[in-house]
Image: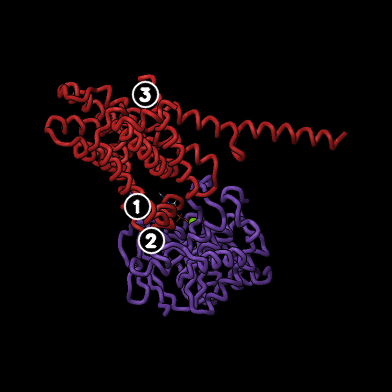
């Protein structure tokens, strides 16, 4: 395998590999909770809304991390504020807020004419990962994994039955915003690898694949992390060998894995379901004959 | 130590319409209390307000001299309709295990003893053979029994059960009433919203009768009078007739 040879030779490739594995893992983990809480759209919104933050950071000459986290969190609060204080439904307020932030981001970034060009932020370029990016991703990853492991119980009960969680005294609002905050961190850490537009794919698709395969949340989270990592490694492989943008390759890989589960999962798979039906019909006609 | 629950002058409104008006009552340790009233009388609203899950216009709830907020870990609540995703990746025994979480507290995991206790609660409601089913793959009555098992698993002192017997067959209902009776004998305070008036005398030793306003609250014998019932349900009542039909 030439790829493995190159991996051992080139430092930038090693950084890209470590970063993309970590991105896949944390997107799978946070994505599981996003999917179960019905917040897929929120994931999309936050990922788009970090763009103006990135632009402002470049203008100010600070790390894009700070600006991105700032606008991400601002978005989560704005969406909450609109849907709680008016009759606008949650999905509409998400649409209103994130399109505005995204639009602002595009204008700012074209004005800033920064070192990193727009396509790279939008579609990801995993090969351009620097040491500082890798460390950022590893730190975010450590935070996300630690929080999820330590508070797994609370995340489980508040995602499954918010009323019970509130009745026994969990601060469910706080948990919601904590998840939004982690989501923002994960999105920012994924920018280099998948890009703004397709972060949502790595958040939603591996988690949805895992959702089809298990009846236990802990297993779902682990499977989602695995599928996420697999997708982003594949993305790296293709962008290195064939010079493709990593984001779209990652998204398509995640989708391919999803399709496999969708068709062949033992419980939910439609192919398995068709076979089962056919078999049943046969045994019924067999019985009446 | 189980304290009396005192409700003092609670009012609740939705969008400016008052649906629970100036309700007050008090029940001591060792009470199994029926909450009665017609559809829309405000029974569920009263329970949620007592638990502090919705906003009260005014009034307060005390457990002994404490607030509800400081006693949450000793409270179990089974809502009328659980607002949950029935496809959630969770099986029956893990759903019941959630009942042990409040006592386990932050940063610790359920241990073997907790899991065994959850199984025991599942056994009490006669659902142990469904332990490994996904929660959505049950009938309505079976789901309800799982949520009751989860409430039992909480080892709470104060129970709030909103129509717990809807969709549950007679024999399971009697088993569960037996469990509630036993808990009552151990001093627990249990509120149960219930519609079947023929069971009232048999099940409850205290009653809360409301129809937006409190009609009456206190011992069953005092509250369960035809005049009171007529006021609550806006029609004539034959309490003796009901007694015969028991
Ligand atoms: N979320 C809500 N928003 C607005 N009005 C509500 C809401 N929930 C209940 N209501 C109204 O408040 C009143 C009391 O409702 P509640 O659910 O407390 O009645 P209930 O006594 O539990 O009835 P049931 O026996 O049907 O369960 C009803 O008139 C109902 O229409
Ligand atoms: Mg009700």
Q: Secondary structure under badge 1?
A: helix
1 vs 3, front mark = 3
Q: Which residue is mark 1?
A: A146
Q: Against A240, is A203 above or below?
A: below
Is the C-beta of the residue carrying label 1 under 8 Å from the nearest atom of ligand 1? no
**Disc marking residue A239:** 3
Q: List the single residue furthest toward the right.
A: A289
Do discs 2 and 1 share a chain? no
Within 10 angstroms of label 2, few (less than 14), some, or many (20 or more) residues? many
The reply, left or right, for residue B246 in relation to residue A194 is right
Outermost residue, left side: A60
Circle 2 residue = B49
Chain whose colour in the figure is red: A
For the residue labelled by badge 2, is the local secondary structure a helix, a strand or a loop?
helix
| Residue B137 sits above or below residue B246 on the image | above
- Identity of the residue drawn at 48% across and 37% down: A208
- Are there few (<14), some (14-19), or many (20+) residues within 10 Å of tag 3? many
- How far apart are the two marked residues, 1 and 3, measured between alpha carbons? 31 Å
Alpha carbon of mark 3 to alpha carbon of mark 2: how far?
Answer: 57 Å
Q: Position of residue A215 (x, y in %)?
A: 54, 47
User: In the rendered picture, chain B carries what hue?
Assistant: purple
Give the image location of residue B71, x and y in percent. 37, 69
Foreground residue among A80 and A55: A55
Q: Residue B126 at x, y = what percent?
A: 64, 63
Could you tell me which chain the residue with mark 2 belongs to? Answer: B
Picture quadrant where residue A181 is located: top left
Dividing the picture into quarters, in which one does residue B65 lie? bottom left
Res. A37 image quadrant: top left
In-front residue for pair A104/B191 = A104
In front of the other: A65 or B241: A65
Cα separation between marks 2 and 1:
36 Å
Please identify, in this view, whether the residue under mark 2 or under mark 1 is nearer the observer. 1
């Amino acid at each position: 395998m030439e790829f493995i040879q190159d991996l051992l030779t080139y430092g930038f490739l090693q950084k890209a590999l470590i970063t993309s594995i970590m991105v896949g893992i944390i997107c799978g983990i946070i994505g599981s909770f996003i999917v179960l809480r019905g917040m897929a759209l929120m994931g999309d919104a936050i990922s788009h809304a970090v763009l103006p933050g990135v632009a402002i950071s470049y203008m100010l000459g600070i790390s894009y991390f700070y600006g991105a986290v700032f606008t991400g969190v601002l978005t989560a609060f704005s969406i909450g504020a609109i849907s709680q204080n008016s009759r606008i439904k949650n999905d509409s307020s998400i649409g209103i807020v994130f399109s505005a932030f995204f639009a602002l981001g595009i204008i700012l970034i074209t004005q800033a004419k920064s070192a990193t060009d727009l396509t790279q932020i939008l579609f990801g370029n995993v090969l351009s990962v620097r040491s500082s990016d890798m460390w950022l991703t590893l730190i975010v990853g450590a935070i996300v994994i630690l929080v999820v492991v330590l508070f797994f119980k609370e995340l489980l009960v508040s995602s499954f039955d918010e009323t019970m969680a509130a009745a026994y005294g969990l601060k469910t609002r706080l948990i919601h915003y904590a998840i939004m905050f982690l989501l923002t961190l994960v999105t920012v850490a994924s920018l280099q690898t998948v890009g703004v537009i397709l972060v949502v794919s790595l958040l939603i698709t591996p988690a949805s694949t895992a959702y089809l395969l298990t009846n236990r949340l802990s297993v779902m989270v682990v499977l989602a992390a695995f599928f996420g990592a697999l997708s982003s490694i594949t993305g790296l492989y293709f962008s290195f060998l064939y010079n493709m943008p990593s984001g779209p390759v990652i998204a398509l890989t995640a989708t391919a894995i999803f399709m496999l589960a969708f068709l062949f999962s033992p419980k939910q798979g439609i192919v398995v379901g068709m076979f089962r039906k056919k078999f049943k019909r046969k045994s019924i006609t067999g019985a009446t004959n | 130590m189980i304290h009396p629950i005192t409700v003092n002058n609670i009012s609740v409104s939705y969008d400016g319409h008052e649906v629970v008006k100036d309700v007050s009552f008090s029940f001591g340790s060792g009470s199994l209390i029926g909450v009665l009233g017609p559809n829309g009388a405000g029974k569920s609203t009263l329970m949620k307000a007592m638990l502090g899950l919705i906003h009260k216009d005014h009034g307060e709830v005390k457990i002994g001299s404490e607030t509800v907020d400081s006693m949450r870990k000793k409270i179990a609540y089974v809502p009328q309709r659980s607002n949950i995703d029935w496809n959630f990746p969770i099986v029956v025994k893990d759903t019941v295990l959630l009942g042990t979480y409040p006592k386990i507290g932050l940063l610790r995991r359920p241990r073997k003893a907790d899991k065994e206790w959850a199984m025991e609660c599942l056994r009490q409601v006669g659902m142990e053979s469904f332990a490994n089913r996904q929660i959505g793959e049950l009938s309505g009555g079976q789901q309800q029994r799982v949520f009751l098992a989860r409430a039992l698993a909480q080892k709470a002192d104060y129970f709030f059960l909103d129509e717990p017997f809807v969709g549950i067959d007679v024999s399971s209902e009697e088993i569960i009433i037996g469990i509630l009776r036993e808990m009552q004998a151990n001093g627990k305070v249990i509120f149960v919203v219930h519609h079947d008036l023929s069971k009232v005398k048999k099940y409850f030793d205290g009653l809360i009768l409301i129809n937006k306003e409190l009609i009456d609250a206190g011992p069953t014998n005092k509250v369960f009078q035809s005049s009171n019932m007529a006021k609550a349900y806006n029609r004539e009542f034959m309490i003796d007739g009901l007694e015969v039909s028991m």
